[in-house]
Amino acid sequence: MKNNYLIAVDLDGTLVSEFNNNDDKSLALLKKLGKNNYIVIATGRPFRSSKYYYDLLELKTPIINYNGALVHNPHDYNFSKTMITVNKDWIIKIVNDNKDILTNAFCEVEDDIFWLSVEKAIESYLHLDGGNLHIGDFQDTLKTNPNGAILFSKLGSEKRLEKYINDNFSNKLKIRFWDDKNFVVSEVYSPLTTKGNGIKRIIDYYKIDKEKTIAIGDGHNDIELFDEVNIGIAMANSHPDLIKIAKEVTNSVNANGVYHFLSNFFSEK
């Protein structure tokens, strides 16, 4: 029987669709596998909106939040907390220099959320439940370095934003884009912030053989995660760049992809 594997799994697009439609079948199997394996949630979400899944799975392992900017274990304080931030003045400059194309933005310091202006259309991105909301110009509200920033901009603004970050913050910040048909959503973050760095710490902490490591995800932010494990499994709905490096592609989140891969893998003789 296979056991003592480390299974790193993403949330949105992997176990959850549309922010709150859960793949209960896959979650139930992960909970069962967690009795004899190390299940690790690796997500771009803050801890407050992933804690539900952490508790549902009855985990005692570290959790990776903000794509690796926050890595901690709520049950094991011997596992030292990782908190990666970016200079708040850089974020303020980015917003001020791109006001003609930016429609909104927010950034976070754990549960403190700094939001330029209230906008119903983007509210789901903020995971407001349990957060301390600060609304207004970052120049006035942002008094400490955040984990990164999420920018909302006009359609077609990707190239300009990417050039701006590369020209002004080369080797200091990175930018990536999320799928949304209504506007451009971009994430600005530290080059040190990766799920890969987070999972490497956890693998080293538990002294797990790389041969017994698996990651399942769907996003561009899962590429570095796949680089650090033996088996990377992409969802059918994954970013094309992730599918290119995956060992295998499973069903989409709505077709219980995590369940189908793991049930087959752990039932093998």
Image: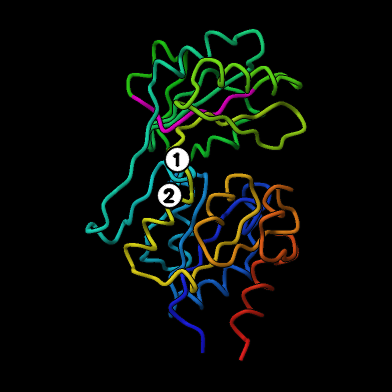
Tell me residue 148's x, y (percent).
46, 30
Residue 155, picture quadrant: top right
Q: Position of residue 249 (x, y in %)?
A: 72, 63
Q: Callout 2: 10 Å neighbours few (<14), some, many (20+)? A: some
Q: Nearer the viewer, residue 97 or 153?
A: 97
Residue closest to the eye, 93 or 154: 93
The verdict on residue 59 being magenta is no
Q: Residues within 10 Å of mark 1 (few under 14, many from 20)?
A: many
Give, as a single range, the part of the protein colored magenta: 145-152
Q: Residue at x 55, y 18 (%)?
A: 117
Q: Which residue is mark 1?
A: 193
Which residue is at a point 39% across and 63% down the rendered structure image? Answer: 203
Nearer to us in this view, 208 or 106: 208
Picture quadrant of residue 248: bottom right
Q: Are marks 1 and 2 in contact (CB under 8 Å)?
A: yes
- Mark 2 element type: helix
- Name the quarter where the C terminus is drawn: bottom right
Residue at the (63%, 19%) spot, across then down? 163
Mark 2: amino acid? Asn
- Residue under label 2: 197
- What amino acid is at disc 1? Thr
Left or right side of 140 for 14: right
**For the residue labelled by badge 1, is the local secondary structure a helix, a strand or a loop?**
loop
Marks 1 and 2, how far apart in space?
Answer: 7 Å
